[in-house]
Image: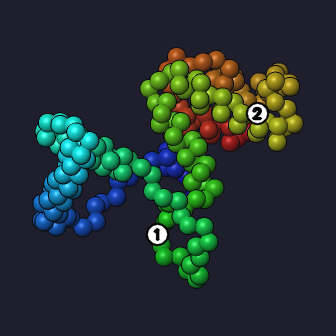
Amino acid sequence: MSTSIDDLLSFAEEPAGEARRTGGRARWVLRTLAVTAAIVVVVVVGLRAVGLQVSLWIIVAGVLAVLAVRRVTAELSPPPPPRAGGRAPAGEEPGTWNWSARDALRAAINGWERPLDWCSGNRERFTERVLPRLGELADERLRQKHGVTRESDPARARALLGEPLWTFLGTPARRPPTPRDLAAIVAELEKL
């Protein structure tokens, strides 16, 4: 079975499970209004206790802004890490993948996925972030298989890498490579 780098780095959106119940949005609005009213009352009482008067609308706007920022940051925060000491299930696996688990494969994929996604369409970022990693990968493959690196024996390394890969690793690109170009580069590196 052959898996390409595109297959490893692609992400398909999973269908949404259950649709929200009809009262979900109304409940959220009522809860937000109740929390806003409670915080506004506390702030107004606190300000009046120290002798300050601020427009009620400014306080309401401030509280709503703080609640909005809190909600946005909660939505954007990563999931909490799994608890240490949790038991691994015995027997067969349930057939679903736990993406929040910390495993080496996921860490390795993230180590490439994030920089590649961040660099897409930006030559400078690609040259600064991804190209050095690819060079290190090529040097490591050359060192393990042939006992040389690009720095220790440039002539032999150039012959082993081939002219296209040598040129790609040695000169900054005018544009970031396409996924197809990256797949060809990875295939050349795997041949070493």
On screen, residue 20 above or below 174: below
Amino acid type at image mark 1: Thr
Query: In the figure, is residue 111 to the left or right of 17?
Result: right
Of the pair 30 and 101, the residue shown nearer to us? 30
Residue at the spot x=59%, y=51% of the render? Answer: 107
Q: Name the residue under label 2.
A: 139
Question: Is residue 69 shown to the viewer in this render?
Answer: yes
Q: In which quarter of the image is residue 69?
A: top left
State the SS at label 1. loop
Specify which label sits upstream in the sequence, 1 or 2: 1
- Note whether 25 is above or below 112 in the view shown: below
Q: Residues within 10 Å of mark 2 (few under 14, many from 20)?
A: many
Which residue: 47% across, 24% down? 122
Residue 144 is situated, as x and y percent measured from the top left of the image, at: 82, 42
Give the x, y percent position of residue 36. 19, 51
Q: Residue 96 carries which label?
A: 1
